[in-house]
Amino acid sequence: MFEHIQAAPADPILGLNDAYKKDENPNKINLGVGVYKDENGNTPILKAVKLAEERLLTKEQSKSYLSIEGSPAYCSAVQKLLFGQNHNIIAKQLAKTAHTPGGTGALRVAAEFIKKHLSGATIWVSNPTWANHQSVFQSVGLEVGSYSYYNANSKSLDFEALLASLSQVPEGDVVLFHGCCHNPTGIDPTPEQWYQLAKLASKQGFLPLFDFAYQGFGQDLTEDAQGLRTFLEHVPEMLIASSFSKNFGLYNERVGALTIVCDSTDQAEAAFTQVKRCIRTNYSNPPSHGSAVVSEILNDSELYSLWESELKDMRTRIHEMRSLFVNTLKSKGVDQDFSFISQQQGMFSFSGLTPDQVAQLRRDYGIYIVGSGRINVAGMTHNNMEPLCDAIAATLKS
Ligand code: PLP
Ligand code: TYF
């Protein structure tokens, strides 16, 4: 029965992580998978999370199923984080939120919802984008198109080309935007550019789908939501896929959310019944623990402040590593200009290293970088910076 089945290719990022784990080089460095690491190279559990878990241990009364959309306290906290406490959308109940298993779960539910209810819609993703986007959308049979985003020569956003691409997107199609900290380039539109994109969305009549996996990793929780909030001043409808894997460090608890924003409360209620139907026929209802932790933190002022400061520490460390990386490369006599890396935000940057250089760094030094040249800056520490930059300098000269 199964003899004709061929092995599937490994996920380009998660597969790299497996290879890193097997590597016996004691000096190996992992700049591959997008997981935050602290100064000691560990992915810690946040203090706010541990405290919330302690409370939950005594408070939790039952392990009975959650409802299809998850707990109301969680869903309402997610909306406040997305839109801001007093947003019109919350007051007028124009949005509905479902807890999904991670951001990936949210994207997959969104994909099914789009396929079933936005007949014939193509979904447009940036070139480049997160490696899994295309597969998630194609797996439900959606057509996936790509729009211009990155200029490899100037290592910056090609905004003219971006506008030109999106001006071709017809009414009724869906366009995916990275809410902040674009994966893999680390380059986001400026506030003025978000404004222009929002105006374009309104003119063209395409539906924005915001993939929001790094809120708080760029500037701060509010600034990072500016793109999404600017859009909502110009368009009445939106889908948002949230992930709390990174900003709460809850990777393996699978906490995310899908939010649908509609033109009226009635439309939101009706559309949400169809979102719930997609969930029911998929995983039925979400796992509880991670969302209980997030909701405990977001709904308690003391834990919220602690979380915000821990998030700030993660963000600040990454910004520091960006500057240190640029300066250390310079101190090693590297001629190429890497200063763009200190202007980008979030975990990732496109380093400009070629596939050959990436392969050489792995073979000769045990340094793991995604084949596209994407580096996870959060994998850098004061300890590994010197050997890392020595290896890159040597590779660039060879
Ligand atoms: N979207 C982007 C842009 C990501 O980088 C990630 C990374 O994990 C996800 C979605 C998926 O998030 P999760 O791990 O919560 O499924
Ligand atoms: O881009 C990354 O590295 C993270 C983690 O299939 C990730 O978003 C990578 C690949 C994948 C799931 C998560």
Image (cartoon, helix red, strand yellow):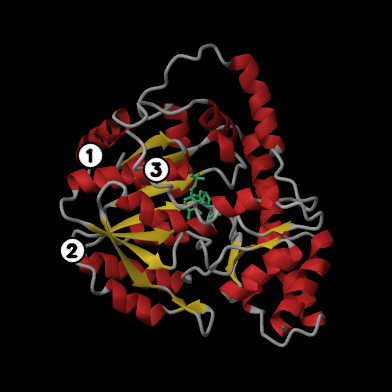
| Ligand 1 neighbours mark 3 (CB distance < 8 Å) | yes
CA–CA distance between discs 3 and 1? 15 Å
Q: Quadrant of the N terminus?
A: top left
Please name the residue shown 66% across and 84% down the image.
337
On the picture, is 263 further left or further right than 6?
A: left
Q: Nearer the viewer, mark 2 or mark 3?
A: 3
Q: Nearer the viewer, mark 3 or mark 1?
A: 3
Amino acid carrying label 3: it is Ala
Q: Report the front residue among 11 and 106.
A: 11
Crowding at label 2, few (<14), some or many (≥20) Cα neighbours within 10 Å?
some
Q: Which residue is mark 2?
A: 171
| Ligand 1 neighbours mark 1 (CB distance < 8 Å) | no
Report whether residue 176 is seen.
yes
On the picture, is 328 further left or further right than 322?
A: right
Nearest to N terminus: mark 2 or mark 3:
3
Local SS, label 3? helix
Q: Which residue is mark 3?
A: 106
Where 169 sits versus 52, above or below? below
What number is the disc on residue 271?
1
The image shows residue 255 at horizontal and vertical percentages of 50, 37
The image shows residue 70 at horizontal and vertical percentages of 41, 28
Please name the residue shown 29% across and 29% down the image.
281
Where 240 sits versus 182, above or below? above
